[in-house]
Amino acid sequence: MLDEPKDFELKILSKINSIDSKYAEIILRLMGYFGNIFFWFLAVGFFALLGAQTSNILIKFGLGLEPFKLSVLLGLGMLIDLIASNILQYLFKRKRPFQTLNVKEGQLIVRSWEITPSFPSAHVHRAFLGVTLLIWGGLEWVFFLYIFACIVGISRIFLGAHYPLDVIFGAIFGILISTIYYFITPPLINWGGATAALIITSLDFIIIILGSALSLIIMWIGFYFWVRIRKKYKKEMMAKYGLDF
């Protein structure tokens, strides 16, 4: 049912995907990282480090736990996102635009060759899930970040990675799944936040710094191999569709 793009999807895709501006491409590519899993794991680390400044005495009295709870909330949320978005994509198995449109004849400008199925957009799903969790977690002032999440959706269409319905339902599923997750896991989040707080605030500052540095190194290694895999796939797909690499 979803393999055949709707007429309105093709019109929107064509209009956004055909934007010819190097400045727009730079901005939209950068904004796309707001929906990247690596960005959100950095946010997890940020809240943990923020909480590490709290006095161990306050933690023992159950005070100053909010940053730790946010860190646990986001961390588990991102794991749920990885599972949920992949299940949904392989459940619907919608083909990517480059698999259904004639790329060689210019029906689509492919700026991002993606490996997984198209529906829903995992980047948009992740962006909306992350922002929604921050709001449910008590940071109501970050409501404006939904604008960034929407730009992620525009970015995915601009890059030729998704049809509009992929983006729309990515947002819907992201908000829905994050809300359900938030309301059924308070005991787990509270316990996880308190436990993380006791462990982190009991460590020496140098240990925290070294642990943070090690985490960043592991993330960058993962990012490096992720980029390598993407480049190899791009080369294979461009050869398959008769395009110059």
Image (cartoon, grey):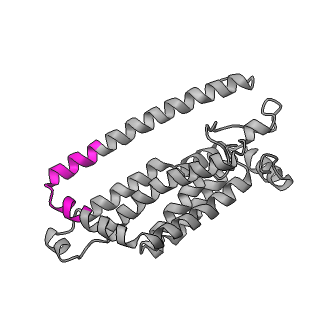
- Using the image as rendered, state which of residue 111 and residue 237 is in the foreground: 237
Task: Point out residue 196 in the picture as x, y percentages from the top left corner.
Answer: 26, 61
Residue at 61% x, 62% y is 173
Q: Say whether residue 113 is left or right of residue 105.
A: left
Q: Is residue 217 above or below residue 53?
A: above
Tell me, yes or no, if residue 228 can be seen here: yes
Q: Say whether residue 155 is left or right of residue 213.
A: right
Residue at the extreme right of the image, as rendered: 7
Residue at 65% x, 49% y is 91
The region drawn magenta spans 196-214
Q: Is residue 176 above or below residue 7?
A: below
Q: Quadrant of the C terminus?
A: top right
Residue at 34% x, 67% y is 69
Q: Say whether residue 159 is left or right of residue 74.
A: right
Q: Quadrant of residue 25?
A: top right
- Taking the magenta stretch, the answer to whether it contains residue 208 is yes
Tell me, yes or no, if residue 244 can be seen here: no
- Using the image as rendered, state which of residue 28 and residue 20 is in the foreground: 28
Q: Is residue 202 above or below residue 186?
A: above
- Taking the magenta stretch, the answer to whether it contains residue 169 is no
Task: Point out residue 65 in the picture as x, y percentages from the top left corner.
Answer: 28, 71
Q: Main secondary structure of the magenta part?
A: helix
Residue at 81% x, 38% y is 107
Task: Point out residue 134 in the picture as x, y percentages from the top left corner.
Answer: 45, 68
**How many marks on residues?**
0
Q: Say whether residue 104 is left or right of residue 200.
A: right
- Using the image as rendered, state which of residue 129 and residue 1 is in the foreground: 1
Q: Quadrant of residue 45?
A: bottom left
Task: Point out residue 208 in the picture as x, y percentages from the top left corner.
Answer: 21, 52
Q: Quadrant of residue 77?
A: bottom left
